[in-house]
């Protein structure tokens, strides 16, 4: 037997956390008896509870020594260190595991890099075709299903985001584009557009409210948001956590990419699609656009993606057929 117990240490944004779950998913498919734990932040705990390949989640609650005590008790055979930060290094070395594995740089996409990290130890792993999340809280799933009964299908979820302190200019599409897109989707396909986001984005998203367009931003916790995404017929978003969550539910997704490259961060799986800019300046991965003086302006890379291009992508990827089937 190679190993009995593994700890994955990962502190990062929601989308990156979803992509990292390719590690337990790949390992469990080959070695189902291996026990896999995650050490992560409170913000990611609820999401990982929907990952059936994770056996235990250790949530960092601000008490460093309490986390170390828990880790020591577990006596891990392997620790995967997925962040290049002092905090992650401290936990990794203090775990006193038999083997330490750092994140691989091999591979093009982030999913491939995470998979290759696992393959450093488990040479016979096969790369799964999809990420995998499930709705482990049936009560929450049924509650969201009940709420959606009042609305017509197809269910289209959009995730517009908002400018805030951590916003990356090249990942945010103009709110006017979201308005126009919602109107075109409702006009052509009927159904319902659900606007998804957090509480700080609710006022910003409220302008998207109209007949058959429902603003749920700030009204759902992470598990409820996951349930909504899993029940969607299509999810459209910039490069952010919800688009990767949706793809892990094998939902059809379209990611609008500006400053981030599809080779690295496009939605993973057969149902993941993307639209990339046609401008020369793209894929810079920078938080601030060098071409903009106003921090609240929209970057030209993602602004080059028009509403018409999104509608054409829906048609060219045969999403129209599926939508028409579920239309009331």
Image (cartoon, rainbow, N blue to C red):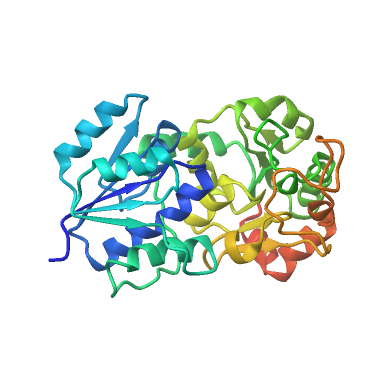
The residue positioned 53% from the left and 48% from the top of the image is: 15
Q: Is residue 110 left or right of residue 97?
A: right
The residue positioned 45% from the left and 33% from the top of the image is: 43
> Can you give x and y, in whole percent of width and height, for residue 301 in the image?
80, 55
- Residue 164 location, quadrant: top right
- Residue 253 location, quadrant: bottom right
- Residue 25 location, quadrant: bottom left
On the rendered image, what quadrant is the N terminus found in? bottom left
The residue positioned 54% from the left and 46% from the top of the image is: 229
Which residue is situated farthest in the left direction here? Answer: 1
The residue positioned 64% from the left and 63% from the top of the image is: 262
Foreground of the two, 94 or 36: 94
Foreground of the two, 143 or 161: 161
> Can you give x and y, in whole percent of width and height, for residue 276 in the image?
74, 62
Foreground of the two, 67 or 197: 67
Q: Is residue 306 left or right of residue 246?
A: right
């Amino acid at each position: 037997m190679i190993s009995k117990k593994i700890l994955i240490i990962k502190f990062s944004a929601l989308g990156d956390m979803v992509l990292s779950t390719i590690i337990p998913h790949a390992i469990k498919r080959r070695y189902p008896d291996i026990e896999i734990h995650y050490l992560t932040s409170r913000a990611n705990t609820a999401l990982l509870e929907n990952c059936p390949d994770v056996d235990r989640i250790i949530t960092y609650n601000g008490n460093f020594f309490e986390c170390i005590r828990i880790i020591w008790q577990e006596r891990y055979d392997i620790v995967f260190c997925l962040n290049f930060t002092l905090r992650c290094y401290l936990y990794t070395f203090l775990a006193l595991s038999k083997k330490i594995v750092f994140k691989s740089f091999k591979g093009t996409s982030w999913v491939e890099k995470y998979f290759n990290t696992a393959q450093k130890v488990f040479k016979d792993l096969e790369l799964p075709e999809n990420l995998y999340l499930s709705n482990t809280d049936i009560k929450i799933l049924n509650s969201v299903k009940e709420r959606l009964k009042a609305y017509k299908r197809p269910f289209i979820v959009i995730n517009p985001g908002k400018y805030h302190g951590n916003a990356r200019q090249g990942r945010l599409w103009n709110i006017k584009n979201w308005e126009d897109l919602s109107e075109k989707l409702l006009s052509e396909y009927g159904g319902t557009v659900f606007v998804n986001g957090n509480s700080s984005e609710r006022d910003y998203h409220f302008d998207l409210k109209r007949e058959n367009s429902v603003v749920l931003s700030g009204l759902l916790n992470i598990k409820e948001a996951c349930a909504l995404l899993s029940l969607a017929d299509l999810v459209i978003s910039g490069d952010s956590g919800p688009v990767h969550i949706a793809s892990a539910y094998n939902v059809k997704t379209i990611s609008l990419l500006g400053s981030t490259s599809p080779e690295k961060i496009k939605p993973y799986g057969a149902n993941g699609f993307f639209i990339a800019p046609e401008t020369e300046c793209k894929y810079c991965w920078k938080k601030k656009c060098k071409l903009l003086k106003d921090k609240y302006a929209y970057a030209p890379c993602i602004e080059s993606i028009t509403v018409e291009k999104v509608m054409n992508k829906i048609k060219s990827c045969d999403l129209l057929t599926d939508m028409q089937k579920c239309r009331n």
